[in-house]
Structures are given as C-alpha cells and as structure tokens.
Image (cartoon, coloured by chain):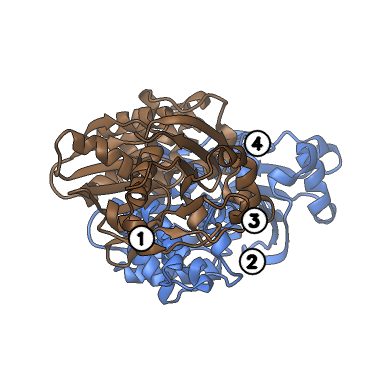
Chain colours: A blue, B brown
C-alpha cells in the first residue's frame, strides 16, 4: 500500500458534467456541475473541456486519480470502453476500466484518468440492453442496501430520460431493462398534438396522475395517449392537468411492464433519481402494489470512489497498466 | 323530388384539402388536392381559402351542394359541428349536418355548404374518443362491405397519424378507438435518439419489420422502443433496417392492443389507408392471426355523396333549414 492518492470522480453524461473531489474516506470535499455534456463539447475536444472544468483541481493535486463514468466512455465520447456483460460485480467492472492515453500527461504527469465501462445485458433473448453511467450509481447504492444485510435480491429503478430497472443480487448487477419513458414524455410535450393542450403547471402526483397510472398500466399505450386529447375535448380533463395525466400514463406503462418482467409478488423497489421524479414514481409503484424505498441520488460519487479504491489498492491497476 | 343538383365533396383535414366534383351517380368527375389543411390557412380565413381552391367550380355550377368533412368542422375549423355519439348510422350523421352561414352567399346564392359532424364514442368507460373525417370514409367503405351481404359485424382499421379502429354493424358505427401510432413514429424519427440511427430507407414489410411486430405485440412498448438503439449498438440490427423495425414495434403494439379489445377470435379486418401503410398493416395483421381485406382508399367521396344524396332527397334538408 502506498499513501492515499487524491481522487476526483467525474460523472460525464450526454447532457451534464458533474465532478467531485473525494477524501480518503470517500466523503465529498468539493463538487462542480455544468451542462457541458458530451454532446455539448465543441468539436469533441474533451481534453480542452476537461482542463477547463477541473484544471485548477489537478494543479492542486499532482498525483490525482481521476475516475469517470457515463457517456464519456461511449463511441461518441473521449474513448470507447467496451461494455461489461451482466452479471457484473465491482471487481469485474474495475477489471474493465480503461486508462486514457492523455495528451496533457506532461502538464500533470502524476495524474491518471480512468474510464468505467458500461454494462450490457440480454435478460430477454433478442432484447440486448445497455447502460453507461447508471452502473456506477447502482454500485454506490448497493453498498447502502447491503449495509442493511442483503445478499438478497433487490430491484433498483433509476427513472429518467431512459429509465433503468436493475436486478441486483450477491453484490452483482444480474440484469436490467431500459424504458424510454422520459424521452417519449419530452417528445410528446414538445412536439405532439398533446403539447398544444398543456399549460405550464408541472406534473404532480395528484389524482390525474393516478388515473393516468391506472390506464397506462393496462398496456395499450398508443391508445391511452390519445385519451389525453379526447378527455380534454370532452371536458373530462382540465388542460392544467394534462402534464400530470400524461406523466401518469407513461410511468404507469413503464412500471407495470417492469413488474411483469419480475418473477413472484411485487418486490420492494429502491428508487434512485431526482426528488421530483422519485415522488411521481413512488406513487405509481405504491398504486401498483410495491413497497418503495427512496435512495440518496448522489451515489455516483460513492460508486466511483469504490472503483477508485480498487485502483488505489493496486490489485486492479497492476494488472491493467 | 327536384332535378339532381351538382355535388361537390370536400375532405378538409388538418394537413390536406381534397375536393371532388361528383356526378348524379356519385362518380368522380373531377378532383383536386392541395396541402392547404386547416392549420395552413392564413389567418384562419377559410372562406378565402375555399374560394381560391374551388371558386371556378362554383361559378360553373350555380346550384351546387357542397358537403365537407374533416377537421374543418372542429373548434379550430370554419364552424364547430358537435360530435354525434355512437352508435351512429348514415341518417343520424346526416341529421347532425350543419349548414354554413357563408359570407359569399351573395356571389353564389344557389350554393349551400354543409359540414358533416365527427363521431364520439366511449367503448371503454373513462376513455372517450373522437374522430373527424374518418366517419365519412367508414360510411363510404361500409357500402362496399354491405354490398357483399353483411348486416354482420365488421372491423375497419384506418392506419395513419391517429389510427382508427372502428366496429360497424347493421349500417352503423358502433364504436371505435384511436391509436397515436403515426404521430409517435414521426416524433421518434424526427426528434429522438433513434432518429439519429436511421438511414434514408423507408419502412418496408420485411423480416426486420416482422421482428418488430412480434416484439411490439408483447406490450412493453417503452422498453422495446429502446431495443432499436441497443440492437444497433450490439450489431444485431443494421442502421438501414431501423425504420422498418421501429415501424413494426409501433404497428405490432397497436394491432395487438386493438385485437385484445375485440371479443372472440381474430376477425377479418378491412384496411383503409394509403397503399404503403396498408402493405405494412396487412403483414402485421396476418402475423397476428387476422384475415385482411384492403379497401379502396378514395372512399371519402363515396361517403360524402351518400350524405349529399340524403340532402338532395329533401328529407334531412327540410328538417334542418
């Protein structure tokens, strides 16, 4: 063992950049966030964007270990890191880390930059699935879940643009599925005939939302979507409630489909998202028969620290250099 | 009975305008089409748009009877005509016609303009549904179907932006449901992450389409949509096939949900749409166990003629003046 090296954790997704300075215990010492997601980096010059975001941090921490997760490791990112197939645990994920051959190595010779792989799974034959960035949140959350004594199976839902439903057991992600819920909601409100009916009120977990959840859970999504319009025309739905109702239709469809995929009675589902999304999903899940537990959303730093600790311990890093 | 009056039939929808001069036997003598749908009429001046499109026809036919259907009778149209509730047959629909109080009546004093109502239905409680324009196509198609001896129940599918599935029996539309299939396809290809994967090839009823139909029919639409991306990433789907596959997912979802709503074994379904859409739906329907019959798509003129004949016969018109 060498002396602890400073760790900088970076969660670099499609539309946002989040960075953390972590202490030797994993505690967050400093944080930064911007909207410099990988699709917004001019000319794809990730090295320049990275210097600009955290160059001062690197100046102050000569031997820093930087660990990144998210779309930065995709084909459109800084360097493509192949997916790790499920089941995948922490040490398998660490084994897939890729060290960046970085042009600024001369300015910061002691700094190493590592990128975490995404995960792939094919729980249903013919339906391959992928994630990048969520795997590190799941790992971070798993330590919370297992702290309460589970080698048990758990289900973690990460609602968002592309919602993920992951099954975990024995410290590994055993499989997962993606739902395009958030993206379809966004398309419908911005570009569809339903968008014209909407007022400014944000979606709320109210009675309209719950009606939407119940209808969305019945399965005929393309039909019940149109009811957002026909119910407004018939006077059965006020325009101020269209967002809540539409949100309910989509979330109800997602949650009921995800629960059908799981064997046995409705499980406890751990939620990992923004407070606003967690509030909506909690109501939908409870209405569809599940227990819910809301987790701390800032678990990416925790997961990245665990990966970094693997590197710092030397067992993985030695194998990969 | 008076002498036959010239009939001009107009199908005026959201994005298109179609007009026909009909002979006393209902045969189409002349036709015009443009993209002057009601949302593209400058300042909502429908009278000016109408003059521009068919003013010369009216000059040549002093006593013309003009019958219009479609969104021109909606709140956003020329005059709002209330929906007729299902079940609704030809005479009930004719009874709901509304005569336009038209500012050009002085230039063409003998001309009358009538607008056909849309239909409303609530076959599932809490899911009110509406159509405008399709009712006249269904009426036109029903005469073909009944010519073959059916007081029987039939199912007519009108694929499109907002696909309609109508049940007809005894000359009446007994109920219907709307699916937002075409609009969601358009949103996904123009604005979503899937659009970026698509090449220019149009959707075809090929093996990729059929795979999509089978997966879409399983119900978890928001999940299988994402597979269009993950299968490209995994190499299981060529980019040139994304349109066919996505089209299959959505049409498979629609058709299977619509069939679940109907009681009994899969019925024969009559298709009424563009040749390209009919070709896709025919394959989806056959793969999901249905017999299919493709109908002539130009049935709007036929339906409007039947309504016009009611007016011309005098029984309806006398009641409504």
Residue density around tag 4, few if under 14, some if 14–19, many if 20 or more, within 10 Å = few
Residue A205, position as x, y percentages in the image: 46, 74
Q: Nearer the viewer, residue B179 or A267?
A: B179
Q: What distance separates the C-alpha of mark 4 from that of mark 2?
A: 31 Å
Same subunit, tags 3 and 1: yes
Residue under numbered circle 3:
B44
Query: Which residue lies at the image location 31% right of the left edge and 48% below the top edge?
Result: B1
Q: Nearer the viewer, mark 1 or mark 2?
A: 1
The reply to whether residue A25 is in sight is yes
Task: Point out the tag, 4 or 2, that comes first from the N-terminus.
Answer: 2
| Left or right: B5 in relation to B90 | right
Same subunit, tags 4 and 1: no
Same subunit, tags 2 and 3: no
Disc 2 element? loop
Circle 4 chain: A
Q: Nearer the viewer, mark 4 or mark 1?
A: 1
Residue density around tag 1, few if under 14, some if 14–19, many if 20 or more, within 10 Å = few
Residue under numbered circle 2:
A27
Query: Which residue lies at the image location 79% right of the left edge and 53% below the top edge?
Result: A53
Residue under numbered circle 1:
B318
Residue B195, position as x, y percentages in the image: 57, 37
Q: What distance separates the C-alpha of mark 3 from that of mark 1?
A: 31 Å
Same subunit, tags 1 and 2: no
Q: Are marks 2 and 3 in contact (CB under 8 Å)?
A: no
| Left or right: B81 in relation to B302 | right
Residue under numbered circle 4:
A76
The numbered dot on residue A101 is none
Query: Which residue lies at the image location 83% right of the left edge and 44% below the top edge?
Result: A108
């Amino acid at each position: 063992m060498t002396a602890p090296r400073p760790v900088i954790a970076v969660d670099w997704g499609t539309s946002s950049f989040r960075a953390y300075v972590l202490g030797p215990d994993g505690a967050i010492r400093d944080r930064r966030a911007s909207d410099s997601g990988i699709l917004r980096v001019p000319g794809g010059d990730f090295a320049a964007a990275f210097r600009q975001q955290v160059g001062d941090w690197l100046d102050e921490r000569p031997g820093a270990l930087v660990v990144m997760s998210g779309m930065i490791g995709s084909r459109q990112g800084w360097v493509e890191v192949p997916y790790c197939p499920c089941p995948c645990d922490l040490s398998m994920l660490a084994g897939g880390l890729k060290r960046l051959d970085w042009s600024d190595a001369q300015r910061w010779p002691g700094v190493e930059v590592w990128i975490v792989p995404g995960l792939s799974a094919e729980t249903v034959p013919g339906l391959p699935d992928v994630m990048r960035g969520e795997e590190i949140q799941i790992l971070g959350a798993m330590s919370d879940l297992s702290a309460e004594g589970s080698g048990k199976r758990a289900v973690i839902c990460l609602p968002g643009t592309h919602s993920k439903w992951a099954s975990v057991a024995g410290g590994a992600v055993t499989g997962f599925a993606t739902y395009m819920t958030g993206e379809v909601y966004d398309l419908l409100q911005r570009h569809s005939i339903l968008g014209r009916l909407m007022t400014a009120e944000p979606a709320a977990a109210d009675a309209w939302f719950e009606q939407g959840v119940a209808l969305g859970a019945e399965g005929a999504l393309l039909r019940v979507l149109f009811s957002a319009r026909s119910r407004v025309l018939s006077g059965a739905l006020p325009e101020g409630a269209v967002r809540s109702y539409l949100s309910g239709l989509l979330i109800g469809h997602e949650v009921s489909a995800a629960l059908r995929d799981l064997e046995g009675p409705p499980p406890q589902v751990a939620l990992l998202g923004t407070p606003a999304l967690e509030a909506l999903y909690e109501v939908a899940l409870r209405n569809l028969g599940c227990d819910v537990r809301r987790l701390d959303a800032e678990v990416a730093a925790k997961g990245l620290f665990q990966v970094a600790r693997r590197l710092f311990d030397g067992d993985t890093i030695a194998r990969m250099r």
